[in-house]
Image (spheres, rainbow, N blue to C red):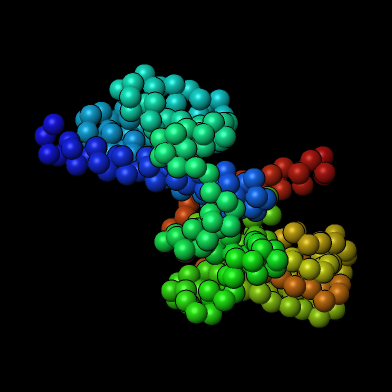
Amino acid sequence: MPEEELSLQRLIDRQVDASLRLVLQAEVLRTGGAADLVLRRLRERVDENAHTALLLLAAALDDERITRASELLRTTASGRERAVLLEALEAILPTEEAARVLPLLDRERPRAIAARAVRVLGSQPATFDEVAREVVADEDHLTAALLEGTLDVETRARLQLDRRRASVPYQAGAAAMATDIEKLLHLRSLELFERLTTQQLADLAAAVAEVTYPAGGAILTEGEFTDGLFIIMTGEVLVTKAGVTLRKLNPRDFFGEMALFDGGMRSATVTAVDTVGLLRLSRDAVLQIMEEQPAIAIAICQTLSRRLRDLLGERS
């Protein structure tokens, strides 16, 4: 085998082995009751490694069809479409490589893949505590921050994570990330951002500011030129126009989204009914993130379109 092909094969082996270890970690953490967001991040990392392996195989085999199918898989959410693409890849790839890589992209049988990982890696499943410590020490700081931020107090104490934080401080970027986990979890609960990856959510959370308004405080005033999207964490707000009450909004509702795009005058007044805790995304910050992460723009546009259809339906 030529040296170049041998190097590519080693890189492919590395990506596959890394994916299998992540699959094992995810299965142990799942059975131990880890948060869905942690499991989702591990699943995304498995996908990233598997897609990297596919791109390396495309280069090794000089087959652009593999690259194209991999790109389509990355953007396809439909189970049926994914199944078709996986079948196409199975027909294109050499049998041995298809058997190694494609199961990693199968989201329907996580336990079967975990069992295969045990056989391939020759390791026995670790305990929850062992895996949790591995993840916290992992080079992927987002996975570590998500796990630490979602563990209960008793588990954190058992794993001595607070002591670790005091003695081994995070890198600067990871420390900032850890402080945004609560915001990230709140953003993840919103339909507006449900299609985003954990990394995209983390980027968004880093741009969010927390603000509080007292009861009776005007958050937005009709006719003002202000921008920004507001997401309600706690409390209740009242939306009025020309003194007429339009609706009340509660936690997990959001408002001000149109100003993200046109930067125009506010079309209504929004007042805090009681003490209200909000997440605020400025127009400049959101537009910058949208430019870097188009999926965020797509998610917001889909929600706005759905809102408009609902509004038109109510008026018809």
Q: Residue 90's spot in the image, x, y percent?
A: 39, 22
Residue name at image x 19 percent, y 42 percent:
7
Q: Residue furthest top?
A: 91
Q: Give the vertical position of 78 relative to 251 (above or below).
A: above
Residue name at image x 53 percent, y 75 percent:
165
Q: Quadrant of the N terminus?
A: top left
Q: Is 276 placed left or right of 22 in the picture?
A: right
Q: Is 89 placed left or right of 77 in the picture?
A: left
Q: Residue 229's spot in the image, x, y percent?
A: 64, 65
Q: Quadrant of the C terminus?
A: top right
Q: Give the vertical position of 316 relative to 137 (above or below).
A: above
Q: Residue 49's spot in the image, x, y percent?
A: 39, 44
Q: Nearer the viewer, residue 245 or 89?
A: 89
Residue name at image x 48 percent, y 51 percent:
294
Q: Residue 93's spot in the image, x, y percent?
A: 32, 24
**Image quadrant where residue 72 sits:** top left
Q: Is residue 36 visible?
A: no
Q: Nearer the viewer, residue 138 or 89?
A: 138
Q: Nearer the viewer, residue 92 or 4?
A: 4
Q: Disc count in the image? A: 0
Q: Is 162 placed left or right of 238 in the picture?
A: left
Q: Is residue 111 visible?
A: yes
Residue name at image x 79 percent, y 73 percent:
276
Q: Residue furthest left?
A: 2
